[in-house]
Image (cartoon, rainbow, N blue to C red):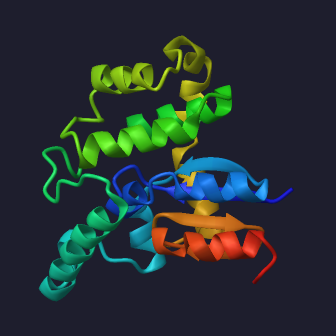
Amino acid sequence: MAHIDYYFTVLSPFAYLAGDSMEKVAAKNGATVSYKPVDIMKLFGEMGGTPPAQRHDSRKEYRLQELKRLSKLTGLPLNLAPAHWPTDQKPASAMIAAAAAAGADAGALTRAVMKAVWAEDRQIADAGTLDAIVAECGIDRASLEPHLAAAAEGFDARTDEAMSKGVFGAPFYVVGDERFWGQDRVDHLDAYLAGKL
C-alpha cells in the first residue's frame, strides 16, 4: 500500500485551496496519509525560498491573481487579506499533529483550520478558537490532550524531516522518493499512485 507524507503549513493559501483533492486521490488509490505540519519560515530560510512579504512586487501581484483564479476554479471562498495572517502557526500545527497521533480525522481538522484563516477571519493562534474548530470537526478535544506536548515538541523535528526529504514549500506530497509540490500537482500524484508515471 502506498503512503503519502503530506507536508504543509496551516498558513498556506495554496494548501487551503487544495481542498480535499489529495484525500480523494489517496482514497481512490488505496494510499494512507500522514499529516505533517511544518515551519514554513524555516523551510524558506534554509531551502532557498523567499517569504511572500520579501518577494518582488511582480511576484506579489501574480500570487494574488493566481489565488483569485484558484478560488474561483475550486469554489472555495478566499479572503486575500485575512485579518489574522500571518499568525503563530505552532498551536494549530500541534493540534493537527496530536489529532493524527490520536487517530482522529487530521485531514478534516487541517482543512478547517486553513478555512478559518483564509475564509472566516478567525485567529487560529487563540486557544479558544482552536478548541472550537476541533469541536466543529467532531473531534473530542480530551482525546488529543495526551498527544499535545509531544506534537508541539515535534514541530522542529517534522520540519527537519521535511527538509531531509527535499521539501522546500507547501503543500508538498512525498511518496517514497517521489516529491510533488503544489496543489496543482495532485493530478500528478494521482497518476503516480495509479502506476501511470
Of residue 183 and residue 76, the one placed in the foreground of this image is 76
Extreme right residue here?
Answer: 1
Q: Residue at x 38, y 39 (%)?
A: 113
* Residue 134 appears in the figure: yes
Of residue 141 and residue 65, the one placed in the foreground of this image is 65
Picture coordinates of residue 108 (x, y %)? 50, 37
Asked if residue 37 lies left or right of residue 123, the reply is right
Asked if residue 100 lies left or right of residue 8, the reply is right
Picture coordinates of residue 158 (x, y %)? 59, 52
* Residue 169 appears in the figure: no
Asked if residue 158 lies left or right of residue 90, the reply is right
Asked if residue 58 lies left or right of residue 144, the reply is left
Extreme top residue here?
Answer: 142
Q: Residue at x 38, y 21 (%)?
A: 131
Q: Residue at x 29, y 39 (%)?
A: 116
Of residue 183 and residue 164, the one placed in the foreground of this image is 183
Where 143 sits versus 50, above or below? Answer: above
Where 95 sits versus 57, above or below? Answer: above
Picture coordinates of residue 172 (x, y %)? 54, 66
The quadrant of the picture occupied by the N terminus is: bottom right
In terms of image quadrants, where is residue 56?
bottom left
Picture coordinates of residue 162 (x, y %)? 60, 62
Q: Residue at x 61, y 65 (%)?
A: 173
